[in-house]
Image (cartoon, rainbow, N blue to C red):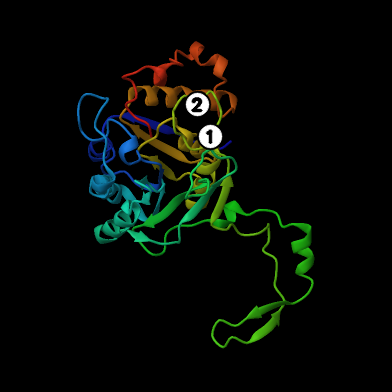
Amino acid sequence: MNKSNYELYLGDTIQVIKNQLNGREIDMIFTSPPYFDLRKNYSGKSDGVVGNVSPDEYADWFLNFTESFLNVLTPNGSFFLNINDKIIDGEVHPVIDELKMKMRKQGWKLVAKPYIWYKKQAMPSKCAYRAIDRYEYVFHFSNTTTPKFYPENCKVPYAKSTIKRFDNPVPTIGSRDGELKYVKKEANEGGSLPHNVVTCAAESNPSILHPAPFTVELADWFVKIGSKVGDMVLDPFCGSGSSGIASLKNGRNFVGIDLMEFNIEFSEKRFEHFLDTGNEYIAKKLLESYGLDVNHYKVKGKHENFK
């Protein structure tokens, strides 16, 4: 495990970036922000319980954050945004399309087609008009059209059948003239380059007390492809700290921000546990010995941040 460091900040993301991170260089941002009207306590209201951001208002609300991200992201840095569609009254709301268009006007470049996070398992559901939802998006934004990108970090071994195919020319249609040609391909050293469908399970470890976390496996893939050892990774809504674990695991430095004190406390103890033991999770039976309230999200009135 490579030596790396982390910082955690409790507070409003925009204010923390302005006051604590001003002048710092952030190489990569990976986050899953509070989603639409399912999430609490990110509207600026003070009661810590109510204050949902409706899909109609979400794009303008989130632009306040993305503006602050632009201020700290290094030239050629990457911002990977995990977000999902919202269905209202049987119709997919255009909030994500609206957000992408407004971010473009703000100065962001959407440099790739969306990555698809395909979930190995899905929550059972039933709908007369839709198939079961098994994926979410991860969008790759940057302040340039040539961001730092390291696909070699995510190569996968070739299957034996694929290696055998390299022995003979394969049919290829020319993109300009449409002519069918047979070309012999060379295998990439070290394995196949990654594609834009990332397959990993949704988080199911019972020791993660956060109601809606993404997995370390997902964060791990994007941390590796969007940064190099020693880079600084920011998660401005760090929740249970999974992006931080992925960063520390791969020798990156990490900055996490969250509005909720419990999330910062949980992430701090999870990081220290990882650095001490190498385990990405604190066993559920050990949580109380770390001073963590295992019933925090089960108590009415404490659902401040369903990230």
Q: CA distance from mark 1 to mark 2?
A: 8 Å
Amino acid type assigned to the residue bearing label 1 in the image? Glu
Q: Quadrant of the N terminus?
A: top right
Q: Quadrant of the C terminus?
A: top left
Q: How many residues crowd mark 2 within 10 Å: few (<14), some (14–19), many (20+)?
A: many
Q: Which residue is mark 2?
A: 208
SS for callout 1: loop
**Where residue 218 sits in the image (x, y, percent)?**
53, 43
Mark closest to the chain's N terminus, 1 or 2: 1
Q: Nearer the viewer, residue 69 or 288?
A: 288
Q: Residue at x 48, y 57 (%)?
A: 149
Image height of 264 relative to 114, above or below? above
To which quarter of the image does residue 190 belong?
Answer: bottom right
Q: Which mark is residue 80?
A: none
Q: Would residue 40 be visible to someone looking at this image?
A: yes
Q: Residue at x 33, y 54 (%)?
A: 94
Is 295 on the left-hand or right-hand side of 94?
Answer: right
Image height of 13 relative to 173, above or below? above
SS for callout 2: loop
Q: How many residues crowd mark 1 within 10 Å: few (<14), some (14–19), many (20+)?
A: some
Image height of 34 relative to 303, above or below? below
Please identify the residue farthest to the left as the structure is shown: 45
Q: Which residue is mark 1?
A: 203
**Where residue 248 sits in the image (x, y, percent)?**
50, 36
**Where residue 268 sits in the image (x, y, percent)?**
43, 25
To which quarter of the image does residue 191 belong?
Answer: bottom right
**Where residue 24 sits in the image (x, y, percent)?**
31, 43
Q: Nearer the viewer, residue 95 or 87?
A: 87
Amino acid type assigned to the residue bearing label 2 in the image? Ile
Q: Nearer the viewer, residue 30 or 57?
A: 57
Is 63 on the left-hand or right-hand side of 226?
Answer: left
**Are circles 1 and 2 on residues that touch, CB within 8 Å?**
yes
